Amino acid sequence: MPRIQKYLQKHAQNLQPAAIAYLAALDQIESFAPLIAHAIEQELSDQRSHLKLIASENYSSLTVQLAMGNLLTDKYAEGYPHHRFYAGCENVDLVEEMAQEELKQIFGAEHAYVQPHSGADANLVAFWSILVQKVQNKEIERLGKKTLDELTPEEYEQVRKLMNQQKLMGMSLNSGGHLTHGYRHNISSKMMRSVFYDVDPKTEQLDYHTLAKQALQEKPDILLAGYSAYSRRINFAKMREIADSVGAVFMVDMAHFSGLVAGKVFQDEYNPVPYAHIVTSTTHKTLRGPRGGFVLCKAEFADTINKGCPLVLGGPLPHVIAAKAIAFKEANSPNFQDYAQRIVKNANTLAEKLKSDGARIVSGGTENHLMIVDLSSFGLTGRHAESILRKAGLTVNRNTIPGDQNGPWYTSGIRLGTPAVTTLGMGTDEMNEIADIIVKVLKNAKPAIVEKTGQLSKANAEIDPKILDEAQQRVNAILAKFPLYPEIEI
Ligand SMILES: *Cc1c(COP(=O)(O)O)cnc(C)c1O
């Protein structure tokens, strides 16, 4: 029997619109493409049966999800509100303006641009806008011309080369930086020269004094702060001073921690918005929105950032912007501040318990939503830990640690984050229990032996099935108390 009929019969007295919409959508999809309906259903059941400890993931609200599934996807709206290249964009204007206004209010930003399709796109919009404004536009002026189109092909070639010679300085991947911050295999290192700063090898934290000296030597054009795998706050007042000392544009990628800024956990010098010329973010990590990105900037950059399309992007995704507007409205509330506080409290509880159970946490702890566990003392690689924990019902991802000897494929660490489990409502008791389960599994796992060679596998791990079974049961007991999307009955 179709899901929706079953639901309507059972709940005639108390219908939940979100549940009806979700189940009806699944029935509709199933009638045409059963594989897709099946995959969605299986994903729900997978997420319900595993503890989501991936620091970059979360659970968006059903309102956010449902706002994406409609005809707004059919509209082209190149340009920005009230300045479009297509007719009939009035309704998209309403949606996009609401998203911008909510964002500006949450972060106290001078300007907000909500079109980037992802965090990587937001960074590209930011990088190229900086290059356009600081290099291209200056050259146009220097050549005594008014617009880009007036440049001769030779002049334009010069401008292109100049942009390519600018220098980006970001945090290294090993220290917790992101691929888009100048990594060789990413376009960020191909459009500019990139250099990196590292955490201090002893404290495994940023040392602003060393960073200031390095900046003076390197003289970057863009100083970039932000991370995907660093468990400490960043002092953005100090970073801005360093950027100013070398005349660099100060850019912050808050993809991971924008929810902690929105939730007022990161205030004053730990809030990047007052200090950075440009701030980029994802919308789907701690901020708990749909998959996407945005850019905030000072008024001086607003005109250039608004031209993200055509500079980098094509047409915006109005259905996703609608979902962003809803997520931003959700984040613009005292409830969300409470949520953000609990994320950080949970992360701290988890880290402290892992430590007291004998695990080493990179940098000695956490001040945000994530932590990196060094696996050396367990004799495991990140891949071992990731796969064995997944078997026990915990989803985590492997991660390099500073100075990692195992490289980015195997790694020597795992990254744990609390945004998703906090959304489900978990607190101190659950964090202590989760830490206990993790350490028990890691202590009892050992690298498997590769049959052909007799050597230790760097990927597969083995564990006594009884211990694995016990871990699974403990995970299930926690999950049973905090159901995911309980209104969707499948
Ligand atoms: C996740 C992340 C991104 C990329 O976001 P996508 O939406 O996956 O493109 C960019 N920067 C940082 C710091 C991130 O953590």
Image: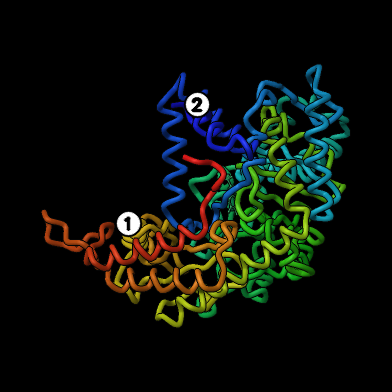
Residue behind label 1 places its C-beta within 8 angstroms of ligand 1: no
Where residue 131 sits: x, y (%)? Answer: 72, 43
Where residue 162 sits: x, y (%)? Answer: 69, 42
Question: Which residue is found at the position 48% from the left and 68% from the top?
Answer: 372
Instruction: Report if residue 313 is visible in the image.
Output: yes
Between 417 and 32, the one lying in front of the other is 32
Q: Looking at the image, is mark 2 or mark 1 nearer the viewer?
A: 2
Local SS, label 2:
helix
Q: Which mark is residue 121?
A: none
Between 32 and 490, the one lying in front of the other is 490
- Disc 1 marks a residue whose amino acid type is Lys
Instruction: Report if residue 410 is visible in the image.
Output: no
Q: Residue furthest top?
A: 87
Per the image, the residue denoted by label 1 is 391
- Circle count: 2
- Disc 2 marks a residue whose amino acid type is Asp
Residue behind label 2 places its C-beta within 8 angstroms of ligand 1: no
Question: Which residue is found at the position 34% from the left and 73% from the top?
Answer: 440
Per the image, the residue denoted by label 2 is 27
- Within 10 angstroms of label 1, few (less than 14), some, or many (20 or more) residues? some
Q: Quadrant of the N terminus?
A: top left
Mark 2 and 1 residues: CB-CB less than 8 Å, in contact?
no
